[in-house]
Amino acid sequence: MKTKISLVVILFATCIAAQQTLDKIVAVVDNEIILQSELDFQVGIFASQRQLDPNTAGLKQQLLNSMIEEKLIYAQADLDSISVTEDEINQRIDYQINSFVQQYGSITNIEKIYGM
């Protein structure tokens, strides 16, 4: 009986130890959160666009501050009831895609660089 209990305790401890954190919250702004994965993605894009080392001192903090400011602006816009049309969103997306195409040469190159 003691062996069975010991075995169950060992298995339970192994399961707990084997768990790993998949993501974590790095900031909360109003009702919005910023995840570590989002920050890492933004750092990767920013560093790639500017040919920087993603581990450059202060880069993560700078981008986190920028993301927080963006969430604050979004929260204020929500309070101010600023609305954006779907057409305006599509125009901004098209502009961003065209900027990437100009920078990298083609959509295929963009997909290769960002692993899509």
Image (tube, rainbow, N blue to C red):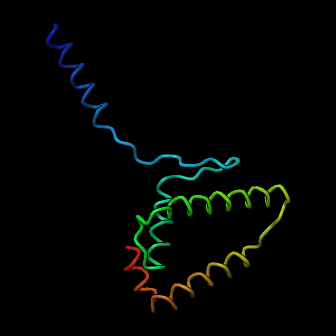
Question: Quarter holding the N terminus?
Answer: top left
Residue 100 placement (x, y as % from top left): 52, 84
| The residue positioned farthest toward the front in the image shown | 57
Residue 98 placement (x, y as % from top left): 57, 88
Vertical comparison of 110 with 35: above or below? below
For this rendering, which residue is in front, 104 or 8? 104
Residue 2 placement (x, y as % from top left): 16, 8
Please state the total of marks drawn on the protein image: 0
Vertical comparison of 36 with 8: above or below? below
Residue at figure coordinates x 59%, y 81% from the top left: 96
Residue 30 placement (x, y as % from top left): 71, 48
Vertical comparison of 103 with 34: above or below? below
Question: Quarter holding the C terminus?
Answer: bottom left
Residue at figure coordinates x 33%, y 38% from the top left: 19
Q: Quadrant of residue 48?
A: bottom left
Relative horizontal placement of residue 66, taking residue 58 as reference (left or right):
right
Relative horizontal placement of residue 29, taking residue 102 as reference (left or right):
right
| The residue positioned farthest toward the right in the image shown | 80
Residue at figure coordinates x 61%, y 59% from the top left: 65
For this rendering, which residue is in front, 44 or 22? 44
For this rendering, which residue is in front, 61 or 86? 61
| The residue positioned farthest toward the top in the image shown | 1
Residue at figure coordinates x 68%, y 47% from the top left: 31
